[in-house]
Image (spheres, rainbow, N blue to C red):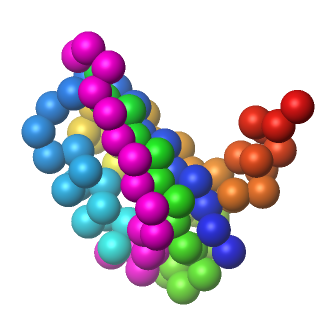
Amino acid sequence: MRAVVTVTGKDKKGIIAKVSAFLAEKNVNIEDISQTILGEYFAMIMLADVTSATEDIASLAKECEEMGKTIGMSVRVQHEDIFNAMHSI
């Protein structure tokens, strides 16, 4: 099972390191990653394999949201199917 992880907020040092380390602690494997800087803002999207995650996707999403608050970023986790449904016409 795969999930889409989005991270947005004001750019600062260490965002990728903190988010990827947090996901690694939860046994989540990042399969693909794209990030950009838009002016002073940071935007990243990751495709992650959550098959072996230590928690279900709902718990993982909640914990990522809380972790995001501690680093001043918005971090969202969605099941890949839900993300695709939301972004199709």
> How many marks overall?
0
Q: Is residue 14 above or below residue 54?
A: above
In the rendered view, tell whether residue 24 sits above or below residue 75. Answer: below
- Whether residue 26 is in magenta: the answer is yes
Instruction: Tell me the residue at 88%/31% (across/down).
Output: 89
Tell me which residue sits at (47%, 54%) in the image: 46
Left or right of residue 53: residue 70: left
Instruction: Measuring from the top left, give residue 2's x and y in whole percent.
Output: 63, 68
Quarter of the image where one finds residue 68: top left
Of 82 and 88, nearer the camera is 88
Tell which of 53 and 88 is nearer to you: 88
Q: Residue at x 51, y 51 (%)?
A: 5
The answer to whether one can see residue 73 in this image is: no
Residue 87 quadrant: top right
**Residue reaching furthest to the left:** 13
Q: Position of residue 45 (x, y in %)?
A: 46, 45
Q: Quadrant of the N terminus?
A: bottom right
Looking at this view, name the residue that lies furthest to the bottom. 52
Question: Residue 64 placed where, x, y %?
Answer: 44, 52
Secondary structure mostly seen in magenta is strand
Is 17 one of the magenta-colored residues? Answer: no
Task: Specify start and end residues of the magenta stretch as a single range.
Answer: 25-40
Position of 34 relative to 25 (above/below): above
Could one spot residue 85 in this view of the protein? yes
At a point 82% along the width and 37% down the height, the residue shown is 88
Residue farthest to the right, as pictured: 89
